[in-house]
């Protein structure tokens, strides 16, 4: 009972601090310090000593270097014409499918996710091209917006993924294996989206009118896709072949992107400065959250909360399905109010020990958690993808959310499939690591 009261007190304190409008990273630090002082009877001198040691150790993590590099890579691509060429390359490959070039949303986001690592960046980069083109060709507005919202969230699941790096650092799980584990679930959810769009188009052909003629053949399409495909091969090939760690692969990817832009004479001083500025803002935000979360995790350890909570869960004899269902609801509710990285760093000190106690593989749970976080990207009131699309389309947030609802359901189905058959996530890491 004391453990439950302590846990409830920490959660109430965290929600209270956030409700006051505090920045998430400062809220985490405040809650950690107040928890140690009020619940753990630590004096201020000891709290200061713990704070300094943990902050220094967390900030010195080598794995964190991958985050600003992958973000910079995405910023450089976002500001070039690679996204336009991606659309031109996918158009002749999709025009004969049921749904036509509506599939460029899903396929474009799936490919771009493999060089971005960010859901919002994926949605914005692909959406700035496809929303205008699909509207010009009179494709169904709701299906166009919804498919982009759902597919854009794949930027968190398909490697390289910023959220997976965050999870790997916190959970002390191999980031390379996490990247491998996200590939098949990401492709599964993309296939569900493609199947849904095709089915809707077969039922009602008016939502995907024919008539878009594109003389570009297979050779021209592959030529347009070459920049993205080349970067994917360089980054993921370096990781999966064992040549480079994720951090080193991020540096290689940045260098390859710069060389590509120089070769195509797109790299200007203004573009480079804008990309650095955008990457700096995002990277500082993510790394600040991670460092603050390390302090909260340590505070929870000093209070013995994760160990006692895990023991309590074990004593309740919850079935594995009941535990996952409860966690799914928990994460979906958090997704209504917080961004994915904040959800991960805030919840993991408590949920990870429970999962390990229940016998689940932390590697598999990383994939499950990322899918839950993806759901939050397309749920109001703070779904980032919804706001990105509102800005791109000029539609109300209500209409964007409604258009995204079927893809929310499809992602839930994808999560259920991964829960029923965990090997979908674990097979590739096992094969490539073996």
Image: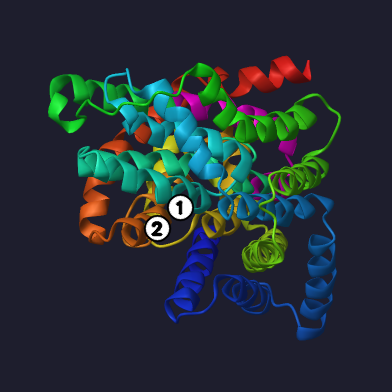
Q: Nearer the viewer, residue 26 or 264?
A: 264
Residue 327's image quarter?
A: top left
Residue 174's image quarter?
A: top right
Label 1 with label 2: CB-CB less than 8 Å: yes
In the rendered image, the vertical position of residue 145 relative to residue 139, given as above or below: below
The residue beneath circle 2 is: 388
> Residue at (19%, 29%) from the top-left corner?
209
In the rendered image, the vertical position of residue 141 relative to residue 411, given as above or below: below
The residue lying furthest to the front in this view is: 215
Indicate the secondary structure of the residue bearing disc 1.
helix
Q: Is residue 409 magenta?
A: no
Q: Please provide percent x and percent y for residue 330.
A: 41, 50
Indicate the secondary structure of the residue bearing disc 2.
helix
In the rendered image, the vertical position of residue 239 relative to residue 16, given as above or below: above
> Residue at (76%, 85%) from the top-left corner?
44
Q: Is residue 173 magenta?
A: yes
> Residue at (82%, 84%) from the top-left corner?
45
In the rendered image, the vertical position of residue 150 relative to residue 29, given as above or below: above
- Taking 31 as reference, is 186 left or right? left
Residues rendered magenta in the picture: 166-189
> Residue at (38%, 62%) from the top-left corner?
382
The residue beneath circle 1 is: 124
Q: Residues within 10 Å of mark 1 (few under 14, many from 20)?
A: many
Q: Residues within 10 Å of mark 2 (few under 14, many from 20)?
A: many
Mark-to-mark CA distance, 1 and 2: 6 Å
- Taking 60 as reference, is 100 left or right? left
Q: Please provide percent x and percent y for residue 303.
A: 67, 63
Instruction: Look at the image and tell me in which quarter the C terminus lies.
Output: top right
């Amino acid at each position: 009972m004391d453990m439950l009261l302590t846990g409830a007190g920490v959660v109430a304190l965290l929600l209270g601090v956030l409700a006051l409008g505090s920045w998430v990273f400062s809220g985490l630090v405040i809650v950690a310090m107040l928890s140690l002082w009020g619940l753990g009877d630590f004096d201020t001198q000891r709290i200061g000593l713990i704070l300094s040691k943990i902050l220094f150790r967390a900030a010195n993590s080598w794995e964190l270097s991958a985050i600003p590099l992958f973000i910079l890579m995405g910023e450089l691509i976002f500001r070039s014409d690679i996204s336009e060429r991606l659309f031109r390359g996918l158009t002749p490959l999709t025009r004969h499918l049921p749904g036509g070039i509506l599939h460029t949303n899903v396929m474009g986001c799936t490919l771009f996710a493999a060089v971005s690592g960010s859901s919002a960046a994926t949605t914005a980069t692909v959406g700035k091209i496809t929303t205008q083109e699909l509207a010009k060709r009179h494709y169904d507005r709701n299906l166009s917006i919804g498919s982009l919202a759902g597919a854009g969230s794949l930027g968190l699941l398909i490697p390289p993924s910023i959220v997976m790096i965050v999870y790997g650092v916190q959970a002390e799980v191999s980031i390379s294996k996490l990247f491998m584990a996200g590939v098949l679930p990401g492709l599964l959810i993309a296939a569900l989206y493609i199947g849904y769009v095709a089915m809707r188009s077969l039922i009602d052909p008016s939502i995907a009118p024919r008539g878009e003629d594109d003389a570009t053949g297979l050779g021209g399409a592959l030529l347009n896709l070459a920049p993205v495909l080349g970067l994917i091969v360089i980054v993921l090939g370096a990781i999966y072949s064992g040549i480079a760690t994720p951090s080193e692969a991020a540096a290689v990817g940045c260098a390859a992107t710069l060389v590509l832009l120089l070769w195509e004479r797109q790299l200007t001083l203004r573009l480079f400065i804008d990309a650095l500025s955008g990457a700096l803002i995002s990277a500082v935000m993510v790394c600040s959250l991670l460092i603050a979360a390390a302090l909260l995790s340590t505070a929870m350890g000093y209070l013995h909360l994760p160990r006692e909570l895990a023991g309590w869960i074990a004593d309740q004899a919850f079935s594995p399905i009941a535990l996952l269902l409860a966690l799914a609801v928990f994460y979906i509710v958090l997704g209504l109010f917080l961004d994915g990285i904040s959800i991960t760093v805030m919840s993991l000190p408590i949920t990870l020990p429970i999962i390990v106690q229940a016998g689940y593989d932390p590697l598999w749970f990383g994939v499950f958690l990322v899918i839950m976080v993806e759901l939050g990207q397309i749920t109001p009131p703070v779904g980032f993808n919804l706001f990105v699309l509102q800005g791109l389309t000029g539609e109300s947030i209500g209409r964007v959310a409604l258009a995204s609802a079927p893809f929310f359901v499809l992602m839930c189905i994808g999560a259920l499939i991964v829960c029923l058959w965990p090997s979908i996530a674990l097979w590739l890491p096992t094969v490539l690591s073996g």
